[in-house]
Amino acid sequence: MSLTASGVKSAKPQAKPYKLSDEKGLYLLVTPSGSKLWRFDYRFAEKRKTIAFGKWDDVDLAKARAHRDAARKSLAEGRDPAIDAVAKDAIKNSFETVGRDWHAAAKTAWTPRYAKLVLGRLEADIFPHLGKDDINAIEPPRLLEVIRKIEARDALEMAKRVKNHCSEIFQYAIAEGKGRRDPAAEIHRALKKPRPKKHMAAVPPSEFPTLVARIHAYDGGEVTRLALLFTLVTMVRTQETRFAAIDEIENLDGPEPLWRLSAVRMKMGREHLVPLPHQAATIIKRLREISPDSRYLFPASTRTGVISENTMLYGLYRMGYHNRQTTHGLRRCASTILNESGKFEPDWIETQLAHADEDKVRGAYNAAIYLPHRRRMLQWWADFVEKPTNIYRIAA
């Protein structure tokens, strides 16, 4: 007689283990401790064998029967269902399977761009080597061997990031009851140390007025000149200037224009608000006169539809600043001068630069943090930049 769900639930423990048979070899083993365990008896190669399908409160009657039917299918095809079951468990517990589960859970807190980036790293450098391995079979030397392949490309920072991704996967597995240890935590000291970061070239404050004067006088193209000035007075990254769009600008003709950059656009994956000084608003209006039908402020006939990543850099080279000043280094110029002026809080400057340290400023990041302070600071900075003939004086 077949079992029923209610019969399984109501089964009581006895002094000795006993079986409640279902059909076709499936039964419920009830132990004196009260455990109710699904078992399937079969014969293979003239030997009697048993497969465990789990506890009744984890596996209901319908699932237990589905497991039994799958096992019977393996037998009919001449395979030992116990071996098939081990193989299936290995797939479920493989590093790639667990890794993709981790990624699916973690990406809800990421931007789509970053989620794609992380998965791409794993698919390129980890899954081809460790993807099929049982997550509990991966030892520190084996993981280090794979990470060394990334280091061999001289991509030391990338190797560190990928190692951290692996560590999070191992820790996720532990939390899910699928893993026992984090071998990534044991190879940290074995990784090659990256070289000291090389700061983007930037002229010292004493040479800054000359730099600004040359940008103002640049005759290599109005759009390039405006792009350099816009980047300088807003303190944004090259990428953020290149893809600046008119629909990101708010209140352009009002007293407090604002540039709202979405989280997808930002390196740190968080929305960033840039209060626009009136010089930046004037630049935008001029750009709209030059390209009134374009969505972008700096359109160009390139694959991306905007000025190339080297447009502003080559402009600086043409002014004589090869190896002395980069576009990204303009941010360094701004940071140095604003910090040395003593007029503004370092937190305001770091927030305007959209650095990771913003999280240290406040526990919960707010895109509008210090907005009134930053507006005043950027207007002071834009006024300073607007007067290239001024002698550089911190206290001015």
Image (cartoon, rainbow, N blue to C red):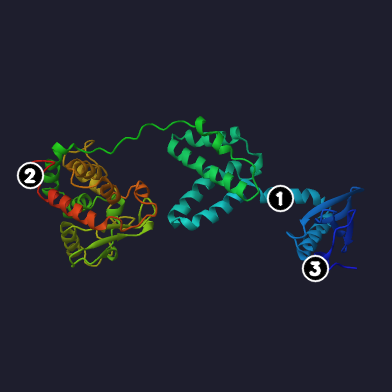
Q: Residues within 10 Å of mark 3 (few under 14, many from 20)?
A: few
> Dividing the picture into quarters, in which one does residue 252 lie?
bottom left
In the depicted structure, whether residue 375 falls above or below residue 142: below
Q: Give the x, y percent position of residue 35.
A: 80, 55
Alpha carbon separation for disc pair 1 and 2:
73 Å
Q: Give the x, y percent position of residue 126.
A: 55, 43
Give the mark nearest the N terminus, 2 or 3.
3
Amino acid identity at mark 2: Asn
Q: Secondary structure at mark 3?
A: helix
Alpha carbon separation for disc pair 2 and 3:
87 Å
Amino acid identity at mark 1: Asp
Q: Which mark is residue 89?
A: 1
Alpha carbon separation for disc pair 3 and 1:
26 Å
Q: Give the x, y percent position of residue 180.
A: 64, 42
- Quarter of the figure with the C terminus: top left
Q: Which residue is mark 2?
A: 390
Give the mark nearest the N terminus, 1 or 2.
1
**Closer to the eye: label 2 or 3:** 3
- The residue sitting at 82% across, 50% down in the picture is 80
In the depicted structure, whether residue 393 falls above or below residue 286: above
Amino acid identity at mark 3: Ala
**Closer to the eye: label 1 or 2:** 2
Q: Secondary structure at mark 1?
A: helix
Of residue 58 and residue 111, the one placed in the foreground of this image is: 58
Q: Which residue is mark 3?
A: 5
